[in-house]
Structures are given as C-alpha cells and as structure tokens.
Image: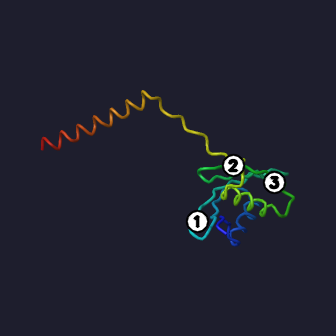
C-alpha cells in the first residue's frame, strides 16, 4: 500500500483540536516520504468547521460536535485529500497573471540590468 496515512500517535492531535479549536499541522506518512497538512478548527455550539490546506489543495469539512468519532472522520477526510480521493478538494485560487506588456517590460528591465552588470565587468 502506497497511500498517505496519519500515524496513530497523531490521531490524538486531531481529537484534541476538535475539542479546543485552533490551528495545527499534522504529518501524513507513506514509506518514501512525509507531507504535512495544515488545518484549522472553528468551533460553534453545535458544529466544528475544519479547513484543511496542503498548499496545492484545500478542503472544508463540517462535523456535528456531538459525534464521538469526529477525529476519525477528520482523519479520513485529510487522508482522502492527500491521496487524491476527494473531488471537492479545490486548488488554491489562481494568482492574477501579469499582462503580456508587463511581462515584456519585466524582461526588458532584467536584460538591461544584466547588460549593465556585464559592462561594469568589462570596464574593470
């Protein structure tokens, strides 16, 4: 099996965070590597809203606070995102790309700086 899994010892972290709320980082492991999931728990009187971020993917889960197995639901949700089994995990919003004219201007500025540096070296 080559799936990312949350170690048993770290499942207590999930349970604790669902009790007190806040932000934490949890490792997910597979034989050849470890990745980290950042998550934030926001508690209300009746529910826990969890936002999970892997840098490239995010997801949100809402759980009822009365469920004693919430840490297991959260564990499964995080593992599913890490292993690509959650279709609702969305990539982060795309950053606005500079216009073509801005890209050309940036390249010209970089080229000019490079040429000036070369001129100084040749003059020395």
Query: Within 10 angstroms of label 1, few (less than 14), some, or many (20 or more) residues?
Result: few
| Residue at horizontal 81 percent and vertical 54 percent from the top | 63
Q: Residues within 10 Å of mark 3 (few under 14, many from 20)?
A: some
Is residue 102 shown above or below 88? above
Q: Earlier in the sequence, mark 2 or mark 1?
A: 1
Q: Residue furthest top?
A: 101
Q: CA distance from mark 2 to mark 1?
A: 20 Å
Sequence order check: which comes first, mark 3 or mark 2? 3
Residue for badge 3: 63
- Judging from the image, what secondary structure is the residue with disc 3 in? strand
Seen at 62% across and 68% down, the residue is 30
CB-based contact (under 8 Å), mark 3 and mark 1: no
Image quadrant holding the C terminus, namely top left
Please tell me whether mark 1 sits on a helix, a strand or a loop: strand
Residue position marked by numbered label 2 in the rendering: 89
Q: CA distance from mark 3 to mark 1?
A: 27 Å
Question: Element at badge 2?
Answer: loop
Q: Residue at x 73, y 62 (%)?
A: 75
């Amino acid at each position: 099996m080559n799936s990312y899994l949350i170690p048993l010892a770290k499942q207590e972290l999930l349970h604790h965070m669902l009790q007190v709320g806040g932000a934490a980082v949890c490792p997910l492991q597979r034989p050849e590597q470890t990745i980290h999931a950042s998550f934030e728990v926001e508690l209300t009187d009746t529910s826990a809203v969890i936002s999970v971020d892997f840098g490239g993917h995010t997801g949100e889960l809402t759980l009822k606070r009365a469920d004693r197995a919430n840490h297991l639901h959260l564990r499964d949700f995080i593992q599913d995102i890490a292993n690509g089994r959650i279709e609702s995990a969305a990539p982060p919003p795309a950053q606005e790309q500079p216009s073509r004219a801005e890209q050309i201007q940036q390249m010209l500025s970089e080229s000019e700086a490079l040429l000036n540096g070369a001129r100084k070296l040749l003059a020395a």
